[in-house]
Amino acid sequence: MKYRGIIFDLDGVICSTDHYHYLAWKKLADKLGIYFDETINNRLRGVSRMASLEIILERCDRTLTEEEKLAAAEEKNNTYRELLKEMSEADLAPEVKETLDALRAGGLLLGIGSSSKNTKFILSQIGLGDYFDAISDGTNITRSKPDPEVFLKGAEYLGLPAADCLVVEDAEAGIQAAAAAGMDSAGIGEAAKSSLATYQLTTFRDLLKVSLQ
């Protein structure tokens, strides 16, 4: 096979928490008197919590101190985590679980590469708490995508060279990060339009065609 491991982004690839993120950021923005809508929310996909906050604060009529920013980010995350408690195994599409099982049966190592600090909690909510061979997330990186750190550490945790790993992403920043890491990438959703993506996936199941060769 061309690859020995696959590293998946979490949100928008394995499952979707976009709506929960939106609701949590919207609540914070409303409290701060800042305009926030779905279009602005789309700019936050694949971006770290603090970087997302900076995007939202572009419309703020005052400058927050670093302490206020940290408190605002923590407040948003607390709201978000409460919303995540509504997630369950029903939020894991059968197609995704069946494809993951087929990839594992084919001998591939599977990892997660996500900027989210809530990665492990989300995985436990959808029934994949102990499923992946390695998890690289917001708790072990200092730089967010498009920096390649999260994927390079994911490959390291899998015990594989970067070139032996395929990244699966739904965001342009993630595709850029994969390219910077020297990894091939499979784009799904909006990322399928990226000229940097090695493969364009129409469905998650299409991953079997490009990885089990």
Image: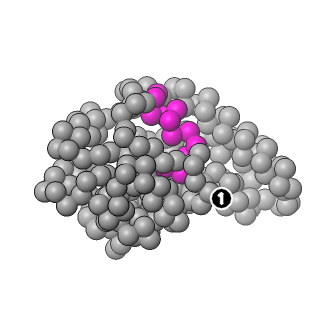
Q: x and y percent of residue 118 in the render?
A: 56, 39
Q: x and y percent of residue 6 in the render?
A: 31, 52
User: Which residue is painted at 18% across and 39% down in the image?
Assistant: 105
**Which coloring applies here?**
one colour
Closer-to-camera residue (136/59) = 136
* Secondary structure type for disc 1: helix
Placement of 121 over or under 3, stated as above or below: above
Q: Classify 10 Å Cα crowding around label 1: few (below 14), some (14-19), many (20 and above).
A: few
Residue 170, quarter of the rendered image: bottom left
User: Which residue is painted at 73% across and 63% down in the image?
Assistant: 58
Which stretch appears magenta? 112-126
Q: Residue furthest front?
A: 159
Looking at the image, residue 41 sits to the left or right of residue 9; the answer is right
Quarter of the image where the C terminus is located: bottom left
Task: Say which amino acid is labelled 1.
Answer: Ala
User: Which residue is painted at 77% across and 48% down in the image?
Assistant: 70
Q: x and y percent of residue 177 in the render?
A: 46, 65
Closer-to-camera residue (103/52) = 103
Quarter of the image where the N terminus is located: bottom left
Looking at the image, residue 119 sits to the left or right of residue 37; the answer is left
User: Which residue is painted at 75% across and 53% down in the image?
Assistant: 34
Q: Which residue is mark 1?
A: 51
